[in-house]
Image (tube, grey):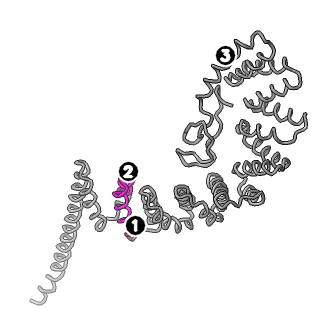
Amino acid sequence: MLELLFLLLPVAAAYGWFMGRNSTKHKELKGRASITRNLSSGLNFLLTDQEDKAIEQLLELLDIEAATIETYLALATLFRRKGDWDKAIRIHEKLHHLKLPKPQAQQIQFELAKDYYSAGLYDRAENLLVSLVKSTKLAEPALKQLFSIFISTQEWHKAELYSQAVMATRSNALHIAMANMLIEADKVKKIATSASIISIADHYPQAIRPKYELGLLALANNDLTTAKAALLHIVQLKPQWSAELLPLLLQCQFEKDEWYQLLSGLANKKRNITAIAMLSDWLVEQGSTFAAEQLLLDQVQQQPSIRLFQKLLQVRQQQSALAAESLSSIEGLVQAYLDKKVLFSCRNCGFKTRNQYWICPSCQQWETVEPISGIDGR
């Protein structure tokens, strides 16, 4: 009898193991079926425009199944794009409280900060972003989002707290943004001096505004040497700004040949419309009206331009008193046409305007709004 009992024990153990395994599988299958039902129910609520019920149903699944995080992130992003920031916040806040790997947790924290920013909760967004600045992977996007907050609140002075973090990046956009916000902070404090502006220009050479502000300040103080050097630096770096800078440079002291070389260089090498027009004026002043007319004719043939055509009309009016009256009426029509044209365009988003902005009102990028080129350009 004992021998039979010992023979049956392995059979009983195998049977117990088999039944236990089947029981575990049954529980897993039952759990997965429950998750599937809840997920299907949540998606059904979404499809029937019952978003609040859908979110409640889907958020309950987070406690059961954390493997579908990417799905929830996509859903929250969809809500944020639609302007449903409260729904995006609820999803991201729930995700933020889960115990997840550090890279995933930081990404969710960043997404939640963007939700808060979109909803106008700038303090909450800033608190989340500050810690992310120390993250290698998210440092740049976190800094850009922080700067967006400072732009919205006009708390320019806060940018200086992140100067070292910006210097550690290779982002031109961040360097240019930092330079501009430091300039704005000085303007608010009314402490802008040549020394402070030069310091900003030296630290952030990618930005043109510090040199521009230095040039204006130097002109106001009758420091023509400093003004000339600062404005010439911009012209060489960004010749498309000649339309704004050449009239300022005209106030500085130039030798006759030096001014001619500057204008001819911009006219011949860069095909700058303003430089060509000012060069024709210079030739007229030197008594070479025919040379000025020939210059304009050649340039208009090579590079059609409404503004150069207008300048050609002006030169011809000076040559002929008989033609002056008829040409004057044509010039008036041309001027009326030009008065309606935009002068600046954002190279980032395409925003167009007649006014100069250091920050684009549309995409909020610094120093992207530049003088336009083309047939109506300057």
Q: Which residue is mark 2?
A: 83
- Measured from the top left, where is residue 353 in percent x and y? 58, 37
Instruction: Decide which of tag 1 and tag 2 comes sooner along the chain.
Output: 2
Check residue 89 for magenta coloring.
yes
Instruction: Decide which of tag 1 and tag 3 comes sooner along the chain.
Output: 1
Callout 2 secondary element: loop
Which residue is pictured at 76% across the width and 37% down the height?
247
Observer-nearest of 153 and 72: 153
Q: Which residue is mark 1?
A: 96
CA distance separating discs 1 and 2:
20 Å
For disc 3, the neighbor class at 10 Å (few under 14, some 14 to 19, many from 20) is some
User: Tags 1 and 3 in contact by the CB under 8 Å rule?
Assistant: no
3 vs 2, front mark: 3
Q: Which residues are magenta?
A: 71-97
- Measured from the top left, where is residue 145 in percent x and y? 52, 57
- The numbered dot on residue 324 is none
Callout 3 secondary element: helix
Image vertical order of residue 343 relative to residue 147, above or below = above
Instruction: Decide which of tag 3 and tag 2 comes sooner along the chain.
Output: 2
Which residue is pictured at 60% across the width and 37% down the height?
345
Which residue is pictured at 22% across the width and 59% down the height?
38
Q: Which residue is mark 3?
A: 330
Left or right of 358 in this view: 27: left
Check residue 65 for magenta coloring.
no
